[in-house]
Every structure is written in structure tokens, then in C-alpha cells.
């Protein structure tokens, strides 16, 4: 609020604006700031994007400037408007085959118009908020599509690497390859070989010098090295030719059959959208592994990302650029370089635009063979062995192979359509492939169901159950993760009728573990450790089914909960992601309802008599270590001390933190424990941090605590001490070796404590070392040497073995 009042000055006619007492002060102008991490990340991404953009434009047969236009637009428009702050957009290798086919069929100006129309379609999809629908596409189809595109790119670019010209189709390129090999161009091959050598050798330079050199992107080094060599040696070979920007072709009106144009728009929209959305999800996963970035970067908004990609394609196509999509190589480089906002991506776009305008003479020195070799390497890397192993493990290799071959032989849209068809057929086959058997062993009838129970299997299930006589004892074994309503009602009705006629029914899983609960129970009785993962057990309004399967891991269980493929298991935790705030309350409620009645008597006894643990168990704070499970112990058995890295500070080195020493003294002198166990584990983050710690720097609380693990690091590095062995094998890597050595060292620290040393002399205490391999679910104990010492102090091998 403001008011005008007369003043007593000479110019009393001029009003003076004043602030009322409760008015807020004026907001100072906001300054635009760029974090140093964003600036350095943008430079790293720019150095990768520049050669790749030119190489992808070369591979498509488009004007070379179009790659630079797409990179600049992707950096500026998609980054500013998109919903994934750290994803870098630009010309993508996954679009190379599609764009090359469009240019060959319709020409460049119509291809630009198709890009604009695809962007409009993406804007429409983003407004409809259907972005997450793209994530329903089977990963086997996406990986197969990328692998097929990678094969197509690699085969086409191989001709340029050899000094020739590629054909328009993959099969034509394969057919022409023998003739091309017979007329190899030595200069082109030499520059391609130099590019590939630098590309793969640069990241593997060892030592401290290599660590510094690896900050320069390998792609830039490879192309720059080939360019410099070709210029100095005077090799005659085709090089980059960037026409004047005044003659740069922009988008024109689409010319061609309507159905063909529509199919092309659909193809570009599909590939751009799926690749960008999956890339945004992958970037979120990368950021989640870096807590410092995660605290400053929010999760991706996929619908907004689709809008941003659509706007970028409209602008890029209108300006004569290639189609734009999120790209994995540049996005991962952006995250790894420490970017904290979308400013890094936008700056990289600015740098590309400046280079396209001011660095034309330098860019025209680049040999085309060098760019072709770079893009060929990218194409080969798109056929990922990791993806092949993943789809094989999930029994989707047929979908992957069909999609890959379809893309290579027929085209992207046709290959994806084939992949979708095969994926649907495989899913239906799995859904209908149900084996139901019945046999009698003595007086017990066994009915086994292998596979999913759907309405299609109800007739066979009814026939098998009809063979069971009245009053018999039945063991019904369900080995499946899904049961639909028809199968549920059929089984429920039969069970009620069979029990009413004097029979009994036990429902089990494949391992024979009983999974039933008494009919009419108002809640489920979960087996031990079920709540660990993907389990959502809540009372319903009516009675729970008498055969509710509580096994974790199902995609849709009879009790209505969801497995790892459903919403409840999407992030690997129990319950839906939006209900994490209620997880503690649910856990307490489940304890009070299911567990408390079983342990109430034992806990009441412990409350009367006090705790009398038999051992002190000192282990890491890692959430995967459940001490009561791996030691088969119960309430009152263990006095547990947890800390980061299962460290035992030497006496006098605690520096104000006496918590571990106090726990040791209390356990030995007050509780009179008879043994102390130090338990390490595989994949220990504290040991990893200890190995990666750089000397100097700020002394954070974590660094100050981890100094107690430095003796373990020194022990491992000692020349006179051989590395420990784990059940006869060598440790898998340095982290595992340090985890093993740390157990040994911390037991040495224990002996230095007065109370422990005194109890050891009196024979009232034993020390044990233990190692738990999380991935193998296997516990190991340290064995004694022949002279009775538990660990060597002069250099004999320390060995961990399975417990007897």
C-alpha cells in the first residue's frame, strides 16, 4: 500500500510515495547465477556433443549443419522446457536409421517438416499426460530396437571407414561389403584406425597422469588426434564440408503420400518419445546414486519432458535440424561431471551454437572417416551384452532377437511392431501355460498347479479337484505369481465344500511351505522375513482368502498385493511409493497384531530377569545385515553394537566418542558376555569410502570416524602379509579384501582394551571374526592357526571358512 501526502518542501505539488508500516520491503532484483559445477559440466558435454553431432549428421546423409542445429536446439529448448533437468538432448544415434530412410525417400526439406509434425504430436501427447504409458513398453523391445539400429549404423559407417560410400539399406550394405574390402582406401582406413585406437585407449590410461587426462572426453581426443595427424601429414581424403549458413535449407511443406508421411511422423514420434522418456528415468537412477546431486536435483517430470522434447523438435525441424531426443552418452557425462541444474545443459547448447558460427574453418579440417569411425563405435556399443544377459535372464530373448532382426531387415517401425506382437504372444503363452497334476500318496492327495491360475485353467483345475474323494486330506501346491478372480472363486468354493464334508486342505508353495491361514481369519499371517520386500499386507473389509499367498516377488498375488512389477514394488521397497510415510505405522501395527502375541511371554520373562546376552555382536550399520537372522538368535541373545564400518577405535584414539569403548566395557564387565564377534560384510560402503578417500580436504564427521579404519588399510598394503582367502578362494576385489582385513584388524584393536585383555587372560572371553557375503547369503567364520592364535601377527595366511 502507498499513499500520497503533501510535503512542506518548495515543490509541494509533487506527491511523495511512502510505505505503510506493515508493507513488505521491495524485493531486490534477482541475479542470474551459474554454479561452477554446471559450467564445468557444460564444457565436458559440449566437447562430447560437437564431434558426435557432426558424425550423426554424416551417418544420416543430412547436411552437416543440421547436427549442430539439433544439438544447439536440444541444449537450449529441451533443457529449458523439459522436465528432466540433467538430461541432454540432441541428435541421437537411435534416430539415425529413421532419419536416413526419410531423407532417402522424401528429401531433406520434407524430413524437416516431418520432424516438426512429430514435435507437434509430442506436444499433444504431453498435454494428454500419457508420458508414463511409454514406460509400459517391454525393455526387451526397446533394447532390441536400439541394437538393430546399432547394427544398421555400424554396417553403414564401415563403408565410409574403408573409404567408400554406404548404400541405403542394411542388406545392400552387407552385399556390397566384399567389393568394398577389395578397394580399401589406405588414408581413410588409417585415420579410422587412429580414431578407434584413441577412442578406446584414452579412458584406460593408468596412473595419476591418466586420471588427469581422462577429464578430456575420449571422443574429442579421437577426432582431434585424427584431424591433427591428417593435417600434418597432408593426407588426401574427404573432409567435413560446411556450406555457408546463407544456403542452409529450412523445412518445407511435406511432399509425398499422406499415409507415408503419417507413418513417418508416427515413427519419429515413437522413437524420440520412448528414447527420451527412458533416458529421463535412467538419469534419475544415476542422480539417485549421487547424494550430493540428488539433494539439489528433483525427479523428472515425464509429461513436462515430453512437452520439452516436442517443442525442441518443432524448433529444430523448422530451422533445418535433425530430430531431437534425449541421449544417454551426453546425459551420463553431464551427471558424472557434477551438474546440479539445467543450466549446464543450456550452456552446452550455447557453446554448440557459438562453435557452429565461429569454428567453421577448424571443423572443416575433420576427416569424414574419423567421424564415421566414431559413429560406428557408438553403433557397436548400442548392442549391449548387459542388455542381452538381462533379457535372457527374464526369458525375453525371443522378443529381443525378433525386434533386432525386424529393425535391421525391415525398418524401425516394422521391427518394433514385430517385437510388440511377439511380446504379447509370449505373455499370453505364459498366462495360459498352466500344468495341473493329481496323484495320491497313501491317504494324502497331492494337487499341483504349475503356472498362472486364470479363467482358462479353471476347467482343468475343476477336473483335478473332482478326482479328490470326500473327506480326504489334500495338499494343494500353488506355484505361480498370479490368480484371477475366476480361479480364486472356483478354488475357494471347492475348498469350503470339501472342508464342510469333513476333508482337510493344506495349501503350500513349491517348496512345501504352508501358505494358508484359517478360513475366516481377518488378517494374514506373514511368514518370517516376508515384510522385507514387495509385501503389502493389510486387513481388508471382508475375510481374507484362505489361500492367500504371502510369497514376495509375485506380480499380482491372491491377497491383492503387488509384486516387483506392480506399483507396490516399483522402487524395491514394500508398499507403494506414495505410502512410505505410513510404512512405520503399518509395521508397528503388524507387529502388535501378529508377532507380539507370540513373543509376549518371552519378553515378559526378560523384563523380569533383565538382559543376559551370551555375546557382544559388533557389526556394520548396513541395513542389509539382520543380525538375528544370520545368527538364528532371538530376544536377549545378542548385545548388538552397530557403527559405520564395524570399527573398534583403539583406546585413547576416540577423540570424544567413547560409545564403542563404553559398549565393550559394559558388555564385558557388567553383562559378562562370553564372546565378542566382529562381523564384516561384502559391499561395505565404509570400506569403499576408505579406499577412495583422497588425502587432505575438509575433515567431515565421516572422515574423522573412518580414520579408525586406516590401520586396516595399512595392514592390507603391508608387503609381508599375504591377502586373506575366503573359503579357499582369493577375494573378488580390493574392497572385499579390505572388508576381510578390517575384521582381523578390529579384533586386534579389541585386544588392546583393558576389560577385553583382562577377560582373555582369565579365559572368560573368546573373540570371533565373521564375514557375511550379502549376495550369496553366506556367513563365514575365521579359523584358528595351528598354534592356537586366531589371527596371524607375523604374516601367515588368514583364512575364512564356512562354519561347520
Image: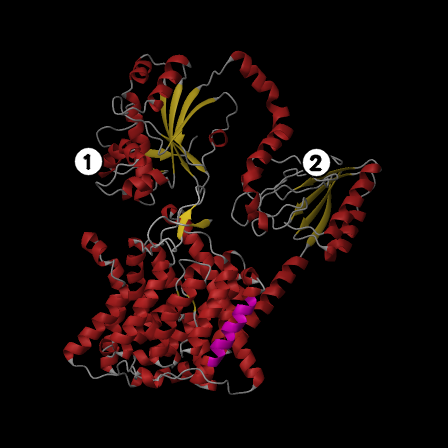
Query: 470 left or right of 259?
Result: right
Q: Does the magenta stretch include residue 197?
A: no
Displayed quadrant of residue 695: top left
Q: Is the magenta stretch mostly helix, strand or loop?
A: helix
* Mark identifier at residue 517: 2
Q: Are marks 1 and 2 in contact (CB under 8 Å)?
A: no
Q: Is mark 2 on a helix, strand or loop?
A: loop
**Of 60 and 582, which appears nearest the observer?**
582
* Mark identifier at residue 720: 1
**Of 596 and 246, which appears nearest the observer?**
246
Q: Is residue 505 visible?
A: yes
Q: Does the magenta stretch include residue 117?
A: yes
Stretch in magenta: 113-125
Q: Is mark 1 on a helix, strand or loop?
A: loop
Q: Where is residue 793 in the image (x, y as percent from the top left)?
A: 23, 28
**How would you rate the neighbour count of disc 2 (Cα within 10 Å): few for under 14, some for 14-19, many for 20 or more?**
many
Amino acid at each position: 500500500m502507498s499513499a500520497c501526502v503533501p510535503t512542506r518542501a518548495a515543490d509541494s505539488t509533487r506527491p511523495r510515495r511512502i510505505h505503510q508500516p506493515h508493507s513488505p520491503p521491495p524485493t531486490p532484483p534477482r541475479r542470474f547465477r551459474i554454479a561452477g559445477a554446471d559450467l564445468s559440466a557444460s564444457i565436458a558435454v559440449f566437447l562430447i556433443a560437437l564431434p558426435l553431432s557432426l558424425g550423426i549428421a554424416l551417418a544420416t546423409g543430412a547436411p552437416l549443419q543440421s547436427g549442430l542445429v539439433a544439438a544447439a536446439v536440444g541444449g537450449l529448448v529441451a533443457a529449458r522446457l523439459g522436465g528432466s533437468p540433467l538430461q541432454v538432448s540432441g541428435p541421437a544415434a537411435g534416430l539415425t536409421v529413421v532419419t536416413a530412410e526419410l531423407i532417402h525417400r522424401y528429401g531433406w526439406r520434407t524430413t524437416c517438416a516431418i520432424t516438426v509434425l512429430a514435435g507437434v504430436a509430442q506436444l499433444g501427447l504431453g498435454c494428454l499426460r500419457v508420458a508414463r504409458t511409454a514406460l509400459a513398453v517391454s525393455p526387451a523391445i526397446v533394447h532390441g530396437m536400439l541394437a538393430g539400429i546399432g547394427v544398421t549404423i555400424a554396417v553403414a559407417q564401415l563403408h565410409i571407414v574403408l573409404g567408400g560410400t554406404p548404400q541405403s539399406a542394411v542388406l545392400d550394405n552387407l552385399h556390397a561389403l566384399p567389393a568394398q574390402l577389395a578397394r580399401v582406401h589406405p588414408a581413410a582406413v588409417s585415420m579410422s584406425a587412429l580414431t578407434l585406437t584413441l577412442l578406446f585407449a584414452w579412458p584406460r590410461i593408468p596412473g595419476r597422469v591418466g586420471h588427469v587426462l581422462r577429464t578430456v572426453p575420449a571422443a574429442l581426443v579421437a577426432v582431434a588426434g585424427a584431424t591433427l595427424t591428417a593435417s600434418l601429414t597432408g593426407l588426401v581424403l574427404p573432409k567435413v564440408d560446411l556450406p555457408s549458413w546463407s544456403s542452409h535449407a529450412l523445412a518445407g511443406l511435406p511432399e509425398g503420400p499422406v499415409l507415408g508421411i503419417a507413418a513417418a511422423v508416427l515413427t519419429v514420434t515413437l522413437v524420440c518419445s520412448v528414447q527420451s522418456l527412458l533416458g529421463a528415468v535412467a538419469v534419475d537412477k544415476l542422480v539417485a546414486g549421487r547424494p550430493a546431486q540428488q539433494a539439489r536435483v528433483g525427479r523428472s517430470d515425464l509429461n513436462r519432458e515430453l512437452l520439452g522434447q516436442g517443442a525442441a523438435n518443432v524448433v529444430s525441424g523448422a530451422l533445418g535440424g535433425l530430430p531431437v531426443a534425449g541421449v544417454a552418452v551426453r546425459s551420463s557425462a553431464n551427471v558424472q561431471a557434477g551438474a546440479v541444474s539445467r543450466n549446464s545443459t543450456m550452456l552446452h547448447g550455447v557453446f554448440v551454437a557459438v562453435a557452429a558460427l565461429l569454428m567453421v574453418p577448424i571443423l572443416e579440417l575433420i576427416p569424414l572417416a574419423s567421424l564415421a569411425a566414431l559413429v560406428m563405435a557408438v553403433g557397436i556399443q548400442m548392442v549391449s551384452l548387459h542388455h542381452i544377459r538381462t533379457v535372457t535372464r527374464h526369458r525375453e530373448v525371443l522378443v529381443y532377437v525378433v525386434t533386432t532382426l525386424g529393425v535391421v531387415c525391415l525398418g524401425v517401425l516394422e521391427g518394433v511392431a514385430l517385437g510388440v506382437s511377439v511380446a504379447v504372444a509370449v505373455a499370453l503363452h505364459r498366462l495360459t501355460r498352466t500344468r495341473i497334476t493329481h496323484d495320491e500318496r497313501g491317504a494324502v492327495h497331492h494337487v499341483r498347479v504349475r503356472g498362472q491360475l486364470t479363467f482358462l485353467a479353471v476347467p482343468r483345475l475343476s477336473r483335478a479337484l473332482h478326482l479328490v474323494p470326500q473327506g480326504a486330506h489334500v495338499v494343494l501346491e500353488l506355484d505361480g505369481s498370479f490368480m484371477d478372480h475366476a480361479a480364486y472363486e472356483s478354488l475357494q468354493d471347492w475348498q469350503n465344500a470339501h472342508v464342510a464334508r469333513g476333508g482337510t486342505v493344506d495349501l503350500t508353495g513349491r517348496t512345501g511351505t504352508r501358505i494358508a491361514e484359517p478360513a475366516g481369519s481377518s488378517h494374514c499371517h506373514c511368514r518370517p522375513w516376508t515384510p522385507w520386500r514387495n509385501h503389502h499386507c493389510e486387513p481388508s473389509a471382508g475375510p481374507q482368502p484362505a489361500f492367500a499367498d504371502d510369497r514376495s516377488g509375485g506380480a499380482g498375488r491372491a491377497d491383492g498385493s503387488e509384486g516387483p512389477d506392480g506399483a507396490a514394488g516399483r522402487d524395491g521397497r514394500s508398499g507403494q511409493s506414495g505410502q512410505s510415510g505410513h510404512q512405520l505405522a503399518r509395521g508397528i501395527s503388524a507387529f502388535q497384531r501378529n508377532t507380539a502375541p507370540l513373543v509376549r511371554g518371552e519378553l515378559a520373562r526378560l523384563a523380569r530377569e533383565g538382559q543376559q546376552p551370551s555375546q557382544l555382536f559388533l557389526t556394520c550399520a548396513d541395513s542389509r545385515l539382520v543380525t538375528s537372522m544370520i545368527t538364528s538368535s532371538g530376544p536377549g541373545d545378542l548385545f548388538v553394537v552397530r557403527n559405520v564400518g564395524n570399527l573398534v577405535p583403539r583406546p585413547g584414539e576416540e577423540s570424544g566418542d567413547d560409545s564403542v569403548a563404553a559398549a565393550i566395557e559394559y558388555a564385558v564387565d557388567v553383562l559378562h558376555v562370553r564372546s565378542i564377534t566382529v562381523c564384516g560384510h561384502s559391499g561395505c560402503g565404509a570400506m569403499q569410502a576408505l579406499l577412495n578417500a583422497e588425502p587432505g580436504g575438509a575433515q567431515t564427521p565421516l572422515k574423522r570416524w573412518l580414520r579408525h579404519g586406516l590401520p586396516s588399510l595399512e595392514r592390507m598394503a603391508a608387503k609381508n602379509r599375504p591377502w586373506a582367502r575366503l573359503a579357499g578362494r582369493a577375494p573378488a576385489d580390493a574392497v572385499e579384501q579390505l572388508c576381510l582385513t578390517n575384521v582381523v584388524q578390529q579384533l586386534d584393536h579389541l585386544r588392546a582394551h583393558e576389560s577385553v585383555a583382562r577377560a582373555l587372560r582369565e579365559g572368560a572371553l573368546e573373540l570371533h571374526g565373521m564375514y557375511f557375503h550379502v549376495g550369496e547369503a553366506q556367513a563365514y567364520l575365521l579359523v584358528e592357526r595351528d598354534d592356537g592364535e586366531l589371527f596371524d601377527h607375523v604374516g601367515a595366511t588368514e583364512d575364512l571358512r564356512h562354519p561347520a
